[in-house]
Amino acid sequence: MEDYDKREKLKEFFLKIKNCEECELSRSRTKFVFGSGNACASIMFVGEAPGKNEDLQGLPFVGQAGKLLDELLDSIGFDRSEVFIANILKCRPPGNRDPRIEEINICKGYLLEQIKIIDPKIICTLGKFSTQLLLNTDKGINTLRGKVFKIDGRIIMPINHPAAVLYAPSRMEILKQDFKKIKRLIDSDGEMPACEEDVLNLESETTGDEQNKDEQLGLF
Ligand code: SF4
């Protein structure tokens, strides 16, 4: 798809879903948080749900975690206007509770459509929820972070959620190292450098309902 078409399609999609009332989170949200960034980005970051600041401003990752994400992007020579940042849920769960499975199941189609339109070469999943959704696995983030998966020609790399790292500063160095790895992936134009050893075969690494996986991957 041409760059112009991607921008128009994403705008069209935003207008179509911005008043969504498909789940109960529509009643407690202040603002719908579609995501932000470059519709033609080659790299996309996916978190779980808007927090308090995101809900107030209608933008993803604008609090302390967002500041950290900006710093990490800057450390690899990127500005957030060059990437696309989104969450699975577009509305804030009250009190910043975890997303519920039923909410994820209702809302995930929006994220998958965003991925389909933007068509990034690399997706970095931030934390457990987006990692488990996009890899269709029930494995934990500590097992998966820093590993590189290739699905239908697209790279998926799970990393720790910046908000989790703010609560556990000992993980900061790991996150910085993971960003260096992201940079290497970008520099290799979405291809894994030959020296990388942890490219995993998704078929052997994931668990769960195969039919659901097929449906999910069909949207990519
Ligand atoms: S969380 Fe998703 S499904 Fe629920 S109201 Fe918001 S946009 Fe709609």
Image (cartoon, rainbow, N blue to C red):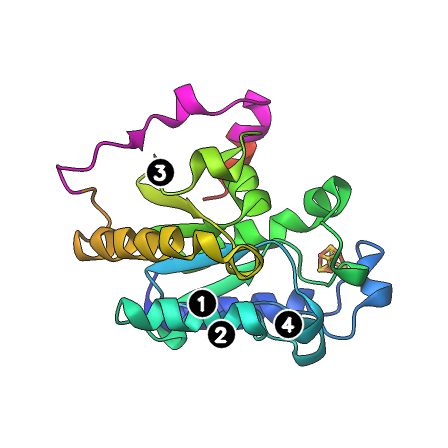
Q: Earlier in the sequence, mark 4 or mark 1?
A: 4
Of residue 20 and residue 203, the one placed in the foreground of this image is 203
- Tell whether position 185 is magenta: no
Q: Label 4 crowding class (10 Å Cα cut-off): few <14, some 14-19, many 20+?
A: few
Q: Earlier in the sequence, mark 4 or mark 2?
A: 4
Q: Is residue 189 above or below residue 210?
A: below
CA distance separating discs 3 and 4: 35 Å
CA distance separating discs 4 and 1: 27 Å
Q: Secondary structure at mark 3?
A: loop
Q: Is residue 76 above or below residue 129?
A: below
Of residue 19 and residue 98, the one placed in the foreground of this image is 98
Residue at image position (51%, 42%) is 131
Asked whether residue 2 is in view, the answer is: yes
Mark 1 Cβ and ligand 1 under 8 Å apart? no
Horizontal side, residue 174 vs residue 103: left or right = left
Q: Earlier in the sequence, mark 1 or mark 3?
A: 1
CA distance separating discs 2 and 3: 24 Å
Which residue is labeled 4 in the image? 15
Do tag 4 and tag 2 residues touch (Cβ < 8 Å)?
no
Which residue is labeled 2 in the image? 67
Q: Quadrant of ligand 1?
A: bottom right
Do tag 4 and tag 1 residues touch (Cβ < 8 Å)?
no
Residue at image position (27%, 51%) is 181
**Residue farthest to the left, as pictured:** 194
Q: Quadrant of the N terminus?
A: bottom left
Which residue is labeled 1 in the image? 69
CA distance separating discs 1 and 2: 5 Å
Tell me where residue 133 appears, x and y as whole percent.
Answer: 56, 40
Name which residue type carries label 1.
Leu
Q: Secondary structure at mark 2?
A: helix
Residue 147, which numbered label?
Answer: 3
